[in-house]
Image: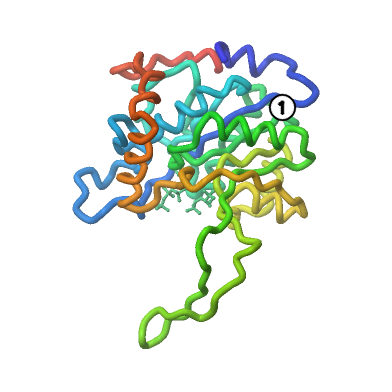
Amino acid sequence: MTDMFAAAKAPGSPQGRFWGLIPCAGVGARAIAPGAPTPDLPKQYHLVAGQPLVLHTLAAFAGVQRLAGTLVAVAPHDQFLDAYASPAWFHLPCGGATRADTVIGGLKALLARGAAQHDWVLVHDAARCLVTTTQINQLMDQCEGDSVGGLLAHKLPDTLKTAVTGPSGVRVAATVDRSDKWLAQTPQMFRLGVLLDALNRLGAAATDEASAMEAMGHRPKLVPGGAQNFKVTYPDDFALAEAVIAQRGGSATLERFKGKRSSPAPTGNPFF
Ligand SMILES: Nc1ccn([C@@H]2O[C@H](COP(=O)(O)OP(=O)(O)OP(=O)(O)O)[C@@H](O)[C@H]2O)c(=O)n1
Ligand SMILES: C[C@](O)(CO)[C@H](O)COP(=O)(O)O
């Protein structure tokens, strides 16, 4: 993955190339505890085990040899990643008001820069910083021969309740059969053109890529991801992510970004 410009312009195989797309334009409102020291800093940039959360995510993608390139879709005017230029990924201010808008913006940006409609794209939340290179490769292995694509997911481990809220608070309405229930994770891997069409049709109601594909009548493949591939969503999740990183040996992901820039990267990324 040395020259993304060359990768985008190369004809690619009939099976299509693979692109990573990281929606990174959210604010993380649920993750910021009252009184936090940096309430305006989006959660994906908070330090986890010594480096901004999203860099852990990007380190996992940087290890995937088959990716032609990885686009990080950030919010307009977000310059945080300018200081972390890397040949392994590039960032663009194509984020939108909802996650679906951000993904649509990223897909269009990939197409505009030479990606093909039939290429595969792996969409992955910036906030799922514990995904591993091995898991990403497993998803690719299991889905590249599939006619639809699929996603990492985790079979529901707990008893599932529905709730009803009344005068005496929130109470159980029923216990639901969990035998067919999975928690959707990311990456979610689909053909770029089909996914863009599906997201355009479903719009903001698509909280993930698979739901847009499902609305088109497809049945995405579920590939077991594991409990550690959780999304940092609430304040407690930062400490949980740090604990997992420490248990994995801590600083391994840092090595890939030793050469990080301390000043904004120059314009002229070879991809553009
Ligand atoms: N307009 C948006 C909203 C979300 N995301 C990204 O989508 C991923 C998953 O979304 P979520 O965890 O819900 O992030 P936020 O929307 O930032 O969180 P919250 O709902 O708590 O504000 C995150 O990496 C987030 O940055 C995005 O790129 N653009
Ligand atoms: C895509 C996703 O991570 C699948 O679980 C999730 O739907 C995105 O988070 P959100 O909180 O629903 O925006």
Residue 92: image location, x then y, percent: 48, 29
Q: In which quarter of the image is residue 118?
A: top right
User: Would you name the residue on which mark 1 appears?
Assistant: 116
| Residue at the (41%, 85%) spot, across then down | 166
267 or 28, which lies in front?
28
| Residue at the (58%, 38%) spot, across then down | 123
Q: Check disc 1 and give the amino acid type.
A: Ala
In the rendered image, which quarter contains the N terminus? top right
Residue 121: image location, x then y, percent: 64, 33
Residue 42: image location, x then y, percent: 34, 42
Residue 207: image location, x then y, percent: 56, 53
Any part of residue 66 in sight = yes
| Outermost residue toward the bottom in this view | 167
| Residue at the (65%, 27%) spot, across then down | 18
In the rendered image, which quarter contains the C terminus? top right
Q: Is 106 above or below relative to 227? A: above
User: Under tag 1, what secondary structure?
Assistant: loop
Q: Does the residue labelled 1 lie within 8 Å of ligand 1?
A: no
Q: Is 136 above or below relative to 232? A: above
68 or 73, which lies in front?
68
| Residue at the (56%, 51%) spot, across then down | 154
